Amino acid sequence: MNCLVVLSHPLPESLNRHFADTAIAALTSAGHKVELLDLYRTDFDPRLTPAERGSYYGERFDAAALEAHAQALREAAVLVLVFPTWWFGLPAMLKGWVDRVFAPGIAFDHATDFGPIKPLLGKLRHVVAITTLGSPWWIDRLIMHRPVRRILKWGVFKACAPKARFAMLSFYAAEKPQPERVMRFADEIRRRLREIG
């Protein structure tokens, strides 16, 4: 299967990079074709351009600056997002990637009456979000009710890829990453990715 791994972290030695490498190795060893998109390393610009916003509801969305990203997303059967959760939200770089690439004609089409959007990511079968959080699990789950998971699962992927299975793996208390916890979490990534077949 075509697998797209999107990494969003500014530090090359981060836990996020380690978990992205774990995911890539697991997918590659299973025989899948894997493409890594490192948003910081490729200097992705997260800002929606005036041309993109101006064409958002036009006859055709201006995706001229996004063709490689759009093509990778369209062709992906598996999408793995690896990122830190900052302030209980997506980091700006990843949020900008979603804003720009999950666009009309790429991830969805507008309904003629501006009703529910029409999904276009029909090839996407599995989405795995891997994130690190500084907070303990109970703050994210019991107090905040997992806002990043809800936004990604219900706000983005159910709208654009309704047939895709969604999983979220969260590494909590990431500022104290004891080696045994990191190893267990990496094993969980491998196990989850083996399940996709």
Image (cartoon, rainbow, N blue to C red):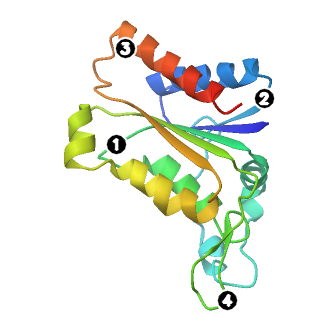
Bin the neighbour count of mark 1 within 10 Å (Cα to Cα): few under 14, some 14-19, many 20 and up: some
Give the amino acid at mark 4.
Thr
Identify the residue at image location x=59%, y=20%.
22
Q: Relative to 54, say whether 17 is above or below.
A: above
Mark 4 lies on residue: 112
Quote the CA–CA distance across marks 1 and 4. 36 Å
N-terminal of the two: label 3 or label 1?
1
Quarter of the image that includes the N terminus: top right
N-terminal of the two: label 3 or label 4?
4
Mark 3 lies on residue: 181
Quote the CA–CA distance across marks 2 and 3. 27 Å
Quote the CA–CA distance across marks 1 and 2. 31 Å
Mark drawn on residue 86: 1
Residue 191 occupies which quadrant of the picture?
top right
Give the amino acid at mark 3.
Arg
Which SS class for mark 1?
loop
N-terminal of the two: label 2 or label 4?
2
Q: Do the residues labelled 1 and 2 touch (CB within 8 Å)?
A: no
